Amino acid sequence: MVNSEKITKIVLISVSLLIIVIAGGMVFSLFGGAIPSFKEFGLKFIVSNNWNPTEGKENYGALPFITGTLLTSVLALIIALPLSFSTSLFLGEYYRNKRISKIIGTMVDLLAGIPSIVYGLWGFYVLRPFLVSLGAPNQGFGVFTASIILAIMIIPYATSLSNEIIAMVPSDLKEAAYSLGATRLEVVLNVTVPAARSGVVAGYILAFGRALGETMAVTMLIGNSNLVPKGLFATGNSMASLIANQFGEADGLKLSSLIAIGLILFILTGIINAIGKFIIKKME
Amino acid sequence: MVKEKDSVIKDHSGSRLLKDKIFLIGIIIFSVITISPILLIIGKLIVKGYRQISLDFLIETTPNTFEAMTSIANGERIPGGIANGITGTLLMVLLAAVIAIPIGLITGIYLYENQEKRLAGVIRNISDILQGVPSIVLGLIAYLWVVKHVTQGFSALAGSTALAIMMLPMIVRSTEETFKMIPNAIKEAALALGVPYYRVILQILIPTGFSGLLTGILLSISRVIGETAPLMLTALGSSVINWDVTKPTSSIPLLIWEFYNDPNMVDLIWSSSLLLMGIVLAFNLISKQIAARRR
């Protein structure tokens, strides 16, 4: 009897430790794979904007892709902000527990279910021609187009947390404000939103982390030019998209440089997610 | 003096109510904009994709680009289908689930049992961080681990490894959350009768929380079915039906990517995407339904 208890415990703990082994192994393998590239280029890898796989003149710098990733993700967050903020208020405040909220909430959740490649196709065949008809340059490819699609993709992540938090704001707080004659708008801006602030912010940070790592939809729309984007409508490339594009023919130094970019992306998303989780934990 | 006082207590309620209305209208407009992409995307897939879907499309393998070109030139429907992708997706997702479900369940149970322990806190945090790792990075990892060292080449096993690491944190979290919601009294009653702990897990906790566990598993599956990027680095793709986990294998998203890049096959993207979208939505809605019935 006692023996079976012990075995159960050992199985539980040893299997649970696997997740630490996996995470540790990931860091180890990414570092190991990136070493040749870091040895060759040192810190220049991060600040150089020259990505050139031509034999003899091989040089790999990650700057265009780091800027491309940050630019598209920040822009996506800016575009997503008013939309997801409004949707959160719609679901968590104005139409809480109403039938319409259930329908709209389900549809927002479904946005998270659409595969990245389908977003990419839609962006390529519907959104891009539409932007061209409005006068977008480069046949509609570029940072801006990629950011719009990214914004749509991260909206469900930005809303899901803030809906809950906004719906959880205690009603006596709101009722106190109403009893002083406040309008609904004044209650929302002065009571609900401040009370839910940190949860809403945490949701946006986690959504930003999602945007950093998106691959397929960005690959299909950003234009894949290995240069630092010169403006919002210029073409560029992101870290994730570069790995997907160039991995096929990569070996040696190029492969190592792609792994180094994967490592940078891994660290960047890790930091962003840690900040988001930290805020959530502090709230509890 | 009197005039000034008048202005202080002047009635602003008209403009305040107007602002209130305008804000609400703004909220509604922005919310409609937020949900419009899902309608537009699904509408586009249905309109452009339904004509290509047929029995052949489901049971035949992909045509080569020459066959597709000839049939387009003759004004015929593109022959063949995406059976190699359907079977590949089935193989890789099943294998990923077989890897991720036991590990995820056991880790979730451990976290639930040891809420306050430091080690549990560490494991929980690492699991959360894993959940945020971009899928393309998981593809790199599976390439470094499996493609290079285990199967010595692109393989379904490598693809499943990437998908399994992706599913794992979602299952861990949903398992812990589900068990937290089970009343302690049920568990304590069994323990008081001297039932060994492994039987409490197998015969009390898992059956009681079954629908919650199932919801989490189905949702995690629906998240990985559409993954393309990690499979490009690991499973690569194949034009024939393959059940050997050590060989390159295709999947529905990988085929969509191939069609997208091949001007002769590009007509097939819509039907393939429609099918993929249908499968993902079905998983999504079923898991929602199970979750709703539980409440």
Image (cartoon, coloured by chain):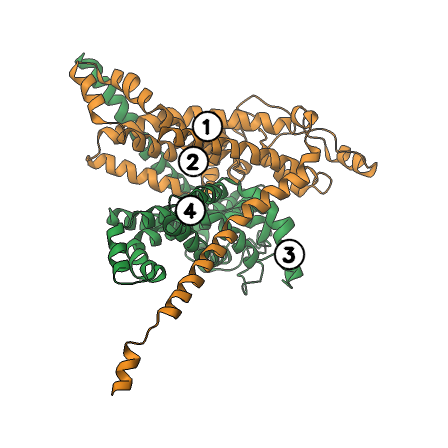
Chain colours: A green, B orange
| 3D distance between C-alphas at marks 2 and 4 | 17 Å
Query: In the picture, which quadrant includes the N terminus of chain B?
Result: bottom left
In what element is the residue under mark 3? helix
| Residue corresponding to mark 1 | B96
Q: Is A271 placed above or below B180 here?
A: below
Callout 1, which amino acid? Ala
| Residue corresponding to mark 2 | B166
Count residues near mark 3 (Cα–Cα under 10 Å), then give few for <14, some for 14-19, many for 20+: some
The residue under the point 24% across, 54% down is A173
The residue under the point 50% across, 31% down is B159
Q: Nearer the viewer, residue A199 or B85?
A: A199
**Nearer the camera: disc 4 or disc 1:** 4
Q: Earlier in the sequence, mark 3 or mark 4?
A: 3
Query: In the picture, which quadrant includes the C terminus of chain B?
Result: top left
Q: Quadrant of residue B165?
A: top left
Q: Is A64 placed above or below B279 here?
A: below
| 3D distance between C-alphas at marks 2 and 3 | 35 Å
Q: Are marks 2 and 1 on the same chain?
A: yes
Q: Residue furthest top?
A: A1
Q: Chain of mark 4?
A: A
1 and 3 marks in contact (CB < 8 Å): no
| Residue corresponding to mark 3 | A130
In what element is the residue under mark 4? helix
Count residues near mark 2 (Cα–Cα under 10 Å), then give few for <14, some for 14-19, many for 20+: many
Q: Chain of mark 2?
A: B
Q: Nearer the viewer, residue B108 or B271?
A: B271
| 3D distance between C-alphas at marks 4 and 1 | 24 Å
Q: What label does residue B78 carry, if any?
A: none
